[in-house]
Amino acid sequence: MSTQTVRPVAPDDEGTDPPAGRGQGASPPAGPPRRRRRLRIEIQTKLLVMLLGIALVTALVVGWIGYRSGSAALERAAEQQVTQVRESRAREVASYFTGLQRSVVLNSRTAERAMEAFEAGWRELEDADVSDAQRAQVTSAYTDVLLPQLAENTGQDFTVESFLPTSDAAWYLQAQYLDPALDYDKALAVDDAGDGSAWSTAHARFHDTLREIVTQNDFEDLLLIDPDGDVVYSAYKGVDLGTNVLSGPYAGGALEDTFREAVTSNGEDYVGLADFEPYQPLADEPTQFAMSPIQDDGRTVGVLAIQASTDRLNEVLTSGGRWREAGFGETGETYLVGPDGLMRSTSRLLVEDPEQYLDRVVGAGTPRDVAETIVRLGNPILRQSVQSTAIEEALDGETGIVRTTGYRGKDVIVAYSPVDVPGLNWVVAAAVDPSEVFAPVNDFQRQLVLAIAGMLLLAAIASLALAQVFVRPIRNLVTGVRAVSGGDLDAQVRVRTNDEVGDLSEAFNEMSRSLRTKQELLDAEQREKDRILHSLMPPDVAEEVKGGEETIAHDYQDVSVVFADLVGFEEFTSDMDSRRSLDHLNELVRSFDEAAERTGVEKVRSLRNGFLASCGLVVPRVDHTRRVVEFAQELQAAVAAFNARHDADLALRAGVNVGTVTSGIVGRASVMYDLWGDAVDLAYRMHAQEPEPGIYVTDRVYDTVRGQFELVEAGTVREPDGEHPVWRLEDRA
C-alpha cells in the first residue's frame, strides 16, 4: 500500500499574497488565507463521460476489427470465385483441345482411302492442260478478292504473282473448284465439277464424308497433304488447294513446322498442335492447325490438317456469351494469351460494346489502327496485346492472383495460370474489376457504420442510467471507510479533487494510519518467508509454491548431476558434542556452497553425509558437464583444506552423470525440493558402490570431458539395460 507524506502547504500554493519579506511593500495577510475555488465536476458526470468514451472506443475497435476481418473474408471469397472461374475455364480449354486431338486422330484413320484416292488423282493432273481463260479466271479471284482483303487486314500491298499456283495440277483444280468470289460455303457444297478427272471422281466419292466431318465439328477447313507437302484436298476449296506447304506461297511458320513434325512422327496417335498464326489464304485471319499422320500399315501416306474454329474456342472461354450466368458478373471475363503476349481468344468488352472497347484499349496504349482493325473484324486474336506481370508469371509456369492494370487500361484483379495443353505455351487469365469484387465490402462497411451508430446511442442511454447507479455506492463507501478506520499511517495521500473521490481520499488517509504498522509487519513476515523459501529451492519453483501449486515436477533433458558424500566424518566427530559436530558440518557445507557458486552449479540438497547438485537445470549451460566435474574437484579441495585446518582425515566420494532428470516438490505439510531420475540414480549407485574415495564418472560424462581431465578406468556399474563402464578422475597434484 503506497502512501505519500503530507507536506505543509505554503500560502503561494493556495493563491494568497506573499508573506512579508518576500517583496517590496509586503504586509502580513489579514485574516485566514483564501482557498482557490475549484470547479466542481460531479463524479456522476465524470463516470458518464468515461462510460461513453469506453463505449465509443470499444465500438470503434470492434467495428474496425469486424471491418478488417469481414472485408478480408469477403475479399477472399471474391478472389476465390475469380480463381474458381479461372480453374474452370482452364479445365474446359484443356478438355476442348483434348477433344480436338481425339477428333483429328480418329478422322485421320478414316481418311486413309481418301488420301490415296486424292493423291492418285493429283498425280494424274501434274501435266494437266490449263487454258488461258482458266488461268485468267483464277488470277481474277486473287486480284479482285484475295489481295484487297489482305491489303485491308494488313495495311500492306501484295503482288498477285507471289500467290498464284506453281503447278499445273494446282491451276487445274482451282480453275475447276475455286469460286470466283471466293465464296467458300458455295465451294463446300460442290460434289463434282464434272470434268471427268480421277481427282473429281475421288472428290465425288469422299467429299460428302469429309464435308460432314467439317460441318459437325465446326472446323474452318480440312486439308489432306501428301508426304511431299502438296495440299491434294481442301474441303472449302480455298486458294491453298494444290499449294505446297513446304515450298509454295504459304510455306513457312507454324503450318510448315507442324506438317514436318506430323509427317515424321511415325505414330498414328500423334497430333501436332500449332499456335495461331496469320494465314494468308484466309486474308491473314488468325488460324490454328491440328495435324495427324495418315498411315497405311505403319507407313505415313499423308497428313490430315484441321483448321480449328476460333468460334468454338471463344465459346468455351465466354460460356457462349453468357458471362453473367456463368458467374462472371458484370465485368468479369476469361481470355487466353500466347507467349508473344497477344490474345488467343476474344474480349468481352469487344463483344458487348465495340465502341467502348476501342476507346479503352487505345487509351491503354494499343495503336489506333490496330484497335480499329480488331473492332472491324471483331477478332482480337494475334492483335490485342496483354502485357502485365501476371501474364509474364503465368508464362513462366506460375499460378496466382494479383491486382494489376489490364489491357483496357483499368485496374483489374487477375487470376492466372498456364494452360495444360501439350505444344501450346498459353496462359488463361480470369479478370474482374475491383469495384465489382469489393462491392460487398462497401455494403458491409455501410451496414457496419449504421450498426456502430446504433450501438453508441444505446450506450449513451445505458451510461446515463449506470452513472446514477454507480455514484450511490461510492458515496456510501466514503461513509463506510470513515466508520471502520481506526489507525494512523505516517504517510498520507494528497487530496487533489473536490468531489466524491476527494472525500474517499480523506477517508483513506484516516484508515491508512491504522494499517501502516500492520502492513509493515506483514511485509516483513512475507520477506522472511520468501528468503527461507528461496534458500530451499530454485526461484521458479519457489514462485510456483507461492502460487499455490501442490504438485510441482519438471522434466529436464541433458542435465549433469553429482552425488557426493564425506568418508570418515562419523569417525571424526564421534567423540564431539552435537554443537561442535554441527559447526564442523556447517563449515564444510559453506565451503561446498561457495564452490557451487564459483562453478555455476546449482545445489539441490545437503545432508549430514551427502551433497546433491546439478548443472544445466535452472540455468541452461552448454558446458554443464565440465562445470560439474570441476565442482567435484572443488569439493575435494575443500575437504583437503578442512583436513589441514582440523587435522582430520576426511575424504570425498562422488559420482557424476549426465542425462534426463526430474525436479519437484516432495511432501505437503513439510515440503522439500528434490531431484530424481535415471541420471540421479546412476550417479548415486556409482558413488555408493565404489569403496575408495574419489570422483567417478559414467561413460556419457567420459565422452564429453575426456580431453579436459585425466580419467582412468575404474570398473563398471550395473544398469537395467546392462553394465556401463566407470572412470575415475585422477587427483590434481
Image: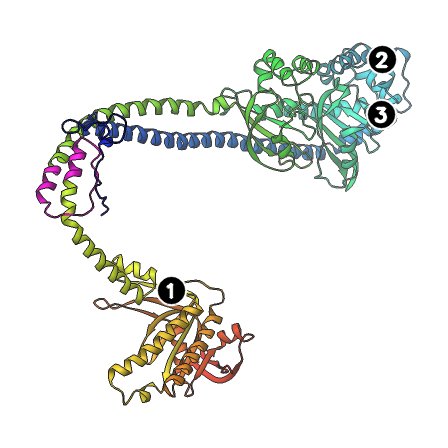
Q: Earlier in the sequence, mark 1 or mark 2?
A: 2
Q: Which residues are magenta?
A: 477-506
From the viewer's perspective, is 614 left or right of 136? left
Q: Which residue is mark 1?
A: 555
Q: Amino acid at mark 2?
A: Thr
**Pointers 3 and 2 in contact (CB under 8 A)?**
no
| Crowdedness near tag 3: few (<14), some (14–19) or many (≥20) residues, C-alpha within 10 Å | some
Residue 688, by quadrant, is bottom left
From the viewer's perspective, is 219 left or right of 36? right
Q: What kind of element bears circle 3?
A: loop
Q: Which residue is mark 3?
A: 248
Residue 609, by quadrant, is bottom left
- Give the residue furthest to the left: 483
Residue 646 in the image, given as x and y percentages of width and height: 36, 85
Disc on res. 712: none
Residue 490 in the image, given as x and y percentages of width and height: 18, 47
In depth, the one of 202 and 324 nearer the eye is 324
| Crowdedness near tag 1: few (<14), some (14–19) or many (≥20) residues, C-alpha within 10 Å | few
- Residues under labels 1 and 2: Cα distance? 98 Å
Q: Judge depth for marks 3 and 2 and give the one in front.
A: 3
Q: Which residue is mark 2?
A: 139
Residue 502 forms part of the magenta stretch: yes
Residue 453, by quadrant, is top left
Task: Inspect this view and state whether residue 96 appears.
Answer: no
Q: What kind of element bears circle 1?
A: strand
Residue 491 in the image, given as x and y percentages of width and height: 20, 46
